[in-house]
Amino acid sequence: MKVKKFKPLGAELTNFVFNNKTTEEELTKLKKIFLQNSVLILRGLDLNAKNLLSIARLWGKPQKHTNFSGIEGYPEIIKIQNYGKKFHTNDHWHSDVTFEEKPPDITFLYALEVPLKGGNTLFSNQYLAYECLPQKIKDSLEGVRAKHSNIRILKMMGQDSKKEKYASHPIFRIHPETNKKALYVTEAFVESIEGMGEAESSRILKDLYLESRRTKYRFEHRWKKGDLVMWDNRCVQHYAIHDYGDETRNMYRITINT
């Protein structure tokens, strides 16, 4: 396999195909590349739901989404379609499903159909976001946790607020496999910083959100049909740009825990 690395995160693989002949040695090498680059891209794949689920299972246990139903026969696979910008739930910076006590480790997104122009996805390196914070902020927020909730998604979808979920996570998360620290606050789901007043919490979160998505931490993926992109939710935030009007954009999405 050949690896083309991007800065400040991301790597594209060529001359490699997932199938039932993929060896443990190849998979170990692939996982190492993934952990080093946080986003992995494979292009020109011809996958159906069954194939995609099989690939995801090589990495861990596929998860069912709390708020969205899976496709028929495959409850772990969500089909993401374009229903217009008003109903676009990923047009913001976030890590996936952080309102769960154990959010998914890795997300797989496979492009079934893409618009002629637009619909790119931005990724931001949260290792770098943490590293570049002033030491004074790192020290003051060490060990501090934030409250995450799915209430905004529920309101957007017109669902019952009784389905609201909460979870508490450290603002600086230690990656369980790399042991590196990453900034772990996402504007889509964080409600407040625990143990702080509303004004102070809002002020600090605003600064952290701005830091988390600085241009110097980003990679932009331009989708093509047949692309399979996987990213590490433990150290990456992403943003799906909705700039393609009513054009068709269909994706299969799976999240897993390793």
Image: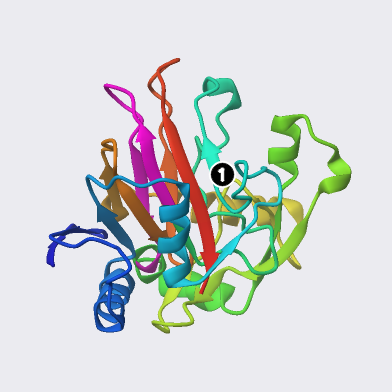
Within the image, what quadrant is residue 101 found in? bottom right
Q: Compared to 11, does 28 lie above or below?
A: below
Q: Dot 1: within a 10 Å radius of its alpha carbon, few (fewer than 14), some, or many (20 or more) residues?
A: many
Write down the region rendered in magenta.
Answer: 108-127
Say which of 115 and 56 sits in front.
56
The mark total stands at: 1
Please state which of residues 48 and 134 is positioned toward the viewer in this rendering.
48
Q: Viewed as shown, does residue 207 lie left or right of 217?
A: right
Name the image quarter holding residue 177: bottom left
**Disc 1 marks which residue?**
78
13 vs 135, left or right, is left
Q: Residue at x 61, y 55 (%)?
A: 97
Q: Position of residue 227 (x, y in %)?
A: 29, 45
Give 55 or 34, whichever is nearer the viewer. Answer: 55
Residue 150, above or below 223: below
Q: Can residue 232 be seen in this snapshot?
A: no
Residue at horizontal 44%, vertical 62%?
54
Regarding residue 13, the answer to whether it shows in the image is yes
Q: Secondary structure at mark 1?
A: strand
Horizontal side of 93 relative to 224 (left or right) equals right
Residue 73 within the magenta-colored segment of the rendering: no
Note whether 170 is above or below 179 in the view shown.
above
Across and down, in percent, residue 60 comes to: 50, 72
Q: Amino acid at mark 1?
A: Ile
Position of residue 67 measured from the top left corner of the image (x, y, whole percent):
70, 45
Is residue 117 shown in magenta?
yes
